Image (cartoon, rainbow, N blue to C red):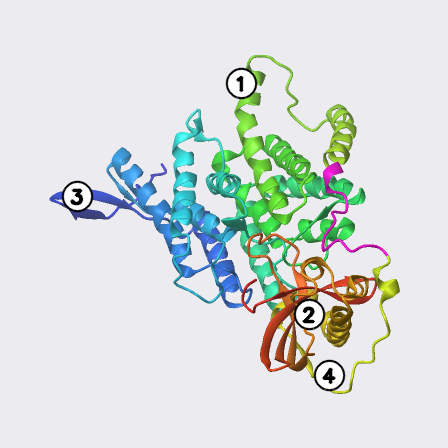
């Protein structure tokens, strides 16, 4: 006769004269494997990917979730429980959330610490407060992030970018860590088919959106990200991989059973794509992806109750259901995406301004050796170096034409060299004494008021203008192959 061996009693901890059991996770607990994977990605982000996130911000998220979870469980069970799930929630919040003003390398920055604490706290509490028949309804970290982004907006916070950087050994390592860790866990829990159903439907739906000319602006691209490029960046994004393999696979907030889980994953894919379709910025697209999961999670209990009451609710993806859903979904995706067709990005330049641009002979030595910032190389790649000399040459020509136009008060001539705020202030900023550059560096100019705005090219020039020392960033705009001067900024102002 087989005998059952009772598990060993948990260790006890004496606190204030009373003893309490201490519940620690097993080494086979899949939550530990997920935590190891996410922590590895956090380390990669800090060391190789220049994430604008501090160790202190991560610790605030982890500590907030751990304290709340341990307190609640101690109150309920009179036990000290290792908060494995809570730490995953806190790590998920810190992985995605970025507070504006945080600089890479400032490891102990407490910038916006209260935002991390509030988001992580809301996420953790949602698991205990928003429940259906004893189970959480919505993925905690996903819910906390969506609420944070919708309430605070891009002036305060932003999500982690879809695009983490050009393909490199470091990026290959990121994908390898993600896939190895997540696939191991999802296969063990039987959740891999649900993740694949999400990705298949999301990729197909986003393909419909992309085929109609969908565009978004993103801070990692100097042009709108449109069509096939938009589709490829999003569906292969490490962020989407994390979403499909870590976030939607929370066993407590997904249906039971293989078929319902596949339907759940496919529904999240379609809902996320429908919400992405009208978005014109990466911020909007990212929040839309996250919101798709919130929406489907909130609807699932309603469908469960409806099915129990005998109302018609499709239980699986039968040919009849697919035949009805697919054409409606395609039309909905096309219609929803109408606002995001080829957005205008950059300064508005009047047609024909270059027709009046005179030929200018730039003197020998007027253009020093031009360098390219690391930021430009990361976003644009080797193409930036090829454009650098032409940018610098056109800038010197712009300043020469502007000076001539200022001496004759010829605004039409000035418009062939400058535009935007520079032309609006003409001739006040014109360097009538001439400009002599000692150093020029191509940089990206970012809008501090809108971190999601498309960055612009600029040249940080140092030298002299007459008797005055010159140290400015000259913002440029490519107009039919000629770089016009749009405005002049102080270094560090953007």
Instruction: Name the mark nearer the viewer: 3 or 4.
Output: 4
Q: Which residue is mark 1?
A: 305
**346 part of magenta stretch:** yes
Q: Which residue is mark 3?
A: 19
Image marks 3 and 1: residues in contact by CB distance under 8 Å = no
Give percent across and percent down for residue 73: 30, 38
Image marks 2 and 3: residues in contact by CB distance under 8 Å = no
CA gap, disc 1 and disc 2: 71 Å
In terms of sequence position, does the residue under pointer 3 or pointer 4 come before the other?
Answer: 3
Which quadrant of the figure contains the C terminus? Answer: bottom right
Query: SS of the residue at dot 1?
Result: helix
Q: Which residue is mark 2?
A: 430
- Give the main secondary structure of the magenta stretch: loop
Instruction: Name the mark nearer the viewer: 4 or 1.
Output: 4
Which quadrant of the figure contains the N terminus? Answer: top left
Image marks 3 and 4: residues in contact by CB distance under 8 Å = no
Q: Which residue is mark 4?
A: 366
**194 part of magenta stretch:** no
Give the residues in magenta.
Answer: 338-351
The residue closer to the viewer here, 11 or 171, is 171
Quarter location, residue 325: top right
């Amino acid at each position: 006769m087989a005998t059952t061996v009772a598990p060993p009693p948990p260790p006890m901890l004496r606190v204030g004269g009373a003893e309490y059991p201490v519940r620690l996770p097993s080494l086979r607990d899949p939550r530990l494997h997920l935590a190891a994977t996410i922590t590895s990605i956090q380390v990669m982000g800090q060391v190789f990917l220049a994430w604008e996130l501090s160790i202190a911000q991560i610790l605030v998220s982890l500590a907030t979730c751990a304290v709340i979870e341990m307190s609640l469980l101690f109150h309920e069970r009179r036990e000290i429980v290792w908060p494995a799930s809570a730490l995953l929630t806190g790590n998920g919040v810190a992985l995605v959330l970025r507070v504006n003003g945080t600089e890479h390398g400032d490891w102990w920055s407490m910038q916006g610490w209260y935002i991390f604490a509030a988001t992580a706290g809301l996420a953790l509490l949602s698991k205990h407060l928003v429940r259906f028949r004893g189970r959480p309804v919505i993925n905690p970290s996903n819910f906390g992030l969506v609420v944070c982004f919708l309430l605070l907006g891009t002036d305060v916070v932003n999500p982690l970018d879809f695009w983490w950087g050009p393909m490199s050994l470091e990026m290959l390592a990121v994908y390898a860590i993600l896939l190895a860790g997540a696939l191991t866990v999802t296969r063990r829990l039987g959740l891999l088919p649900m993740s694949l159903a999400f990705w298949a439907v999301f990729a197909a739906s986003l393909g419909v959106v992309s085929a109609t000319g969908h565009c978004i602006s993103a801070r990692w691209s100097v042009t709108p990200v449109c069509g096939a490029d938009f589709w490829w960046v999003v569906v292969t994004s490490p962020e989407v991989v994390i979403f499909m393999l870590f976030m939607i696979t929370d066993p407590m907030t997904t249906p039971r059973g293989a078929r319902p889980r596949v339907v759940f994953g496919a529904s999240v894919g379609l809902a996320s794509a429908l919400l992405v379709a009208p978005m014109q910025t990466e911020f909007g697209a990212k929040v839309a992806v996250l919101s798709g999961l919130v929406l489907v999670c909130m609807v699932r209990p309603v469908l469960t109750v409806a099915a129990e009451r005998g109302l018609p609710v499709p239980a699986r993806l039968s040919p009849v259901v697919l035949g009805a859903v697919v054409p409606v979904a395609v039309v909905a995706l096309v219609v929803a995406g109408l606002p995001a067709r080829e957005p205008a990005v950059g300064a508005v330049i009047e047609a024909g301004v270059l027709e009046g641009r005179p030929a200018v002979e730039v003197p020998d030595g007027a253009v020093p050796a031009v360098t390219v910032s690391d930021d430009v190389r990361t976003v644009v790649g080797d193409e930036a170096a090829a454009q650098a000399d032409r940018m610098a040459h056109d800038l010197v020509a712009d300043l020469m034409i502007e000076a001539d136009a200022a001496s004759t008060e010829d605004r039409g001539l000035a418009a062939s060299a400058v535009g935007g705020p520079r032309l609006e202030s003409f001739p006040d900023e014109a360097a009538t004494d001439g400009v002599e550059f000692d150093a020029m560096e191509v940089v990206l100019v970012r809008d501090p008021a809108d971190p999601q705005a498309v960055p612009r090219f600029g040249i940080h020039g140092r030298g002299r203008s007459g008797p005055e020392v010159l140290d400015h960033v000259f913002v440029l705009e490519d107009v039919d192959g000629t770089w016009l001067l749009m405005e002049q900024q102080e270094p560090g102002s953007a």
